[in-house]
Amino acid sequence: MSEKRGLVRAEEICGDHEQRAKEIKAGGGKVAGYFCCYPPVELMTASGYLPLRILGDMNEPLTEADNYLPTAMCCFYRSVIDVGMKGRYNYLDAFLGAHACDGAERVSYVWRSYLKSPCSFYLDLPHTNHAAALEFMRKQLIYLNEELEKGAGKKATPEMIREAVRVHNRQRALVRELYGLNRVDPPLLSGSEVLQVMVAIMSIPVEEGNALLAEVIEEVKGRERGPEKKKGRILIWGSLIDNIALTRLIEECGLNIVIDDTAIGTRSFWVDVDEMEDPFAGLAVRYLDKVVCPRTFRDTGETRQKDLDNRFGYLKEMVKGWQVNGVYFNIIRNCDIHGYEIPELRDYFESMGLPVLVVEQDYTTTALAPLRTRFQAFAESIG
Amino acid sequence: MDEKIKTIRSNKTLETAREATLFAKKMLTSARDAVAAGKPVGWSMFEWWLGASVAKAMGVELLYPENYGAFCAAVGKVEAYMDYAEMDGVPGTTCGYARNCMGYARRLKENDYVPPADAPGGGMPKPLFLLGCGAVCDARYKWFQGLGRYMDAPVFTLEFPQTGPMEYFIRGNKENNIKFMVQELRAFVAFLEKIVGKKMNWDQLSERVDIMFKTHRLAHEVDLLRKNAPCPVFCTDFWAIMIPVMYMPDEQESLDFYKRVYAEVKNKVDNHVGAIPNEKYRMMFAELPPWPLLGIFEEFAEKHGTNFVMESWNYHAPPPLPEEERAGINDPLELLARYSYHKFNEGAAFAYEKGVEPTIFTSYYLQYAKDYKADGLFCHPLLSCRPATYTLMHLRNLLLQKMKVPSVVVEGDIVDLRVFNVDEAYAKMDAFTETMDYYREVRKKEGFEW
């Protein structure tokens, strides 16, 4: 294991996010790869697996994807299947797919058809947060836990799951503390540094992640200077970003990324699991109801404004708390769940007086250069 | 000036298929009449028969914007609506039906909710509510949620679990799925009672369920008759006769219509009359067709003898619910839940046995290939309907690997004519007949039945 610490360690892990998983595997441990923010990491941890978020690779040319997926689908999941078919994740002991969105659902099936793991489970997430949906979700999580137990060859008792909940909640608290460092102007961390930490903690055991977060927080608090002050303090909303090539580009264009609502960011960490006697009930509520992603439908309510506040109100808190003065919608091309939200959320932010930049990007570093002028123009428009 | 892209209209081969398009127009007329009479109208996603009968049993007329999208496309009127939606920020990569509907809804709002005079088929009147559905694609609830900017109609999203083929066999999982669906249907009844202002008519609901089962049984039997060689029904026939099966199977008129369809098809089988005069190849089609160009399949048939014997899994009535699943169940909501779940999962055992995922959109074609003795698959990846497209390349691989049935891939769209290259389609079909010949020999050598 590396001797590096803090931000340097996070950068190292982010640069090769499977490094630690392979070390653990070589040492006799087990690794569970999962899609999106929905398979509960607590259950993987309780069964003794390292939870590893499966990512694509923006630097990798797609040479295999076309054999399995059409071009008109989510560019991220095309990349995921491309690197998967090239054997990048062949060492997984468990694969956990999820019905997070259409792309994740169908790619879960395609993945399992060609890439076999000793243990696998497809988590069928409901689409609403209705009471019956929460109960359905709870049962699905019990099934998932049973499959993980079979794969691990040991029981994950309710107490072990409750302990995993506590340690992951600790991680969430540390992540919130980390983001809190960017409330000031200028922020103490760049968006790229935050992203490196997020990718890192999704790639190492939770206790190591917590130690890394504590190191980073201590390091950043003691910094003499962080990113330079820029005119734009932006919130990034949308599909995931897992490569700092994009965040660096944004930051080179006169913008500070101070907060995000993306799947490799606050969305995966912002809310805790309630510590309950029945850990599955707490997990169901957290993942299906408390995590706010456009993939979960929330009843429309009595008025239009109530509907919008119910769906987007939490973003107002981010805008206020992080002194946001511009919003970038990062849409991975062909992402429907974010795509349908664009007109509504754009209007919502603009009603707060915030300029919005919408970019549909192709999840490849080779297509980033043309975006530079758009980010520069957006930075010019702020303030 | 751009040359106008031409539609290629289908003539269909069944007399009853030529009648069937009237059902689509009737839906629109009935809804406008209902509004004029002060009755409730809802817009619904196609929900594989889970909730539509529930709404209709409470006197609600339902309209299907997906069907309206296909209707607008068939008459060449979608571009203006899609452009109007995109001008309001809806991404051009989203579902073509959705953009058509959003553009239409924007126009409707600007016209004080009176259907515009130039709307195809007279247009869809403003709904009292919207019925979304969680099955198959995210657009089918996100799109209705997004309509909130044009109308104050509340959305109810019907849950529809999507079980994996391996997870289907987890003890208790199926019954948990059914229980969940029934609970959600009860919530839908409560939603309707509140918004419509009257109580559910349970007797009428049971009657509707009964009629639907009878209509669908006939539709399924028509599908079974298509196993005959020559196949008596062509894909363009099916894409017409499916309208009552999908949108109004619970009405006596649809049941009566399907009795006539069955009689016509059975008569053709008894007299060895095929849908096309010289059936040389038996093909399948997946999944959604290019609605404005349906006639091209008749042109392929004429040129190559390609009969399209099965198509579009998601539009077909499933086999009847097994008696053991119906026995003792008097709650119409549970019958509906079981039936819709059955539509998606009745092939789970086959999928599991063959090691094929997912069950939906994929494993059923492997079954069709065997049952209908298919020589090839016409794969139609869509630019603007991704969920029907996601697994097509995977399906192509599986069919070839497990059934030695090849595929031809022609990209297109459900609404946008510009995407479908007619010349390329002809060229690919010209070459594909040789591929089908080759794989006939391969199947023969490897001991397949056809």
Image: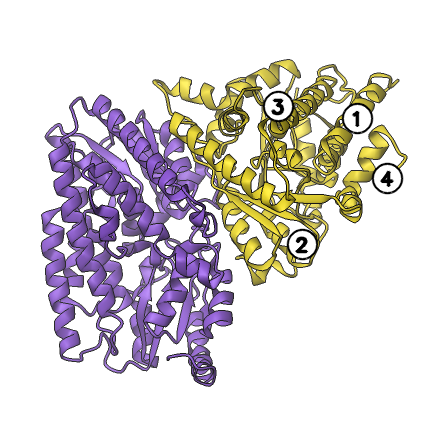
Chain colours: A yellow, B purple
Mark 3 vs mark 1: same chain? Answer: yes
User: Which chain hosts label 3?
Assistant: A
Name the mark on residue A211: 1
User: Which chain hosts label 1?
Assistant: A
| Distance between the alpha carbons at the discs numbered 4 and 1 | 14 Å
Label 4 or label 1, whichever comes before in sequence order: 4
The structure residue drawn at horizontal position 49% and vertical position 71%, both measured from the top left corner, is B400
Mark 4 vs mark 2: same chain? Answer: yes
Instruction: Judge whether residue B111 can be spotted in this image.
Output: no
The answer to whether mark 4 and mark 1 are in CB contact below 8 A is no
Which of discs 4 and 3 lies nearer the camera? The answer is 4
Instruction: Judge whether residue A45 can be spotted in this image.
Output: yes
Judge left or right: residue B280 versus residue A16: left
Location of residue B288 in the rendering, given as x and y in whole percent from the top left corner:
37, 57
Secondary element at tag 1 = helix
Q: Residues within 10 Å of mark 4 (few under 14, many from 20)?
A: few
Label 1 or label 2, whichever comes before in sequence order: 2
Which of discs 4 and 2 lies nearer the camera? The answer is 4
Location of residue A104 in the rendering, given as x and y in whole percent from the top left corner:
53, 45
Location of residue A336 in the rendering, given as x and y in whole percent from the top left corner:
49, 41
Q: Quadrant of residue B238?
A: bottom left
Residue placed under numbered mark 3 in the picture: A270
Label 4 or label 3, whichever comes before in sequence order: 4
Name the mark on residue A29: none
Q: Amino acid type of disc 3?
A: Trp
Q: Which residue lies furthest to the right in this view?
A: A3
Residue placed under numbered mark 2 in the picture: A83
Task: Count the labels in the image.
Answer: 4
Residue placed under numbered mark 4 in the picture: A1
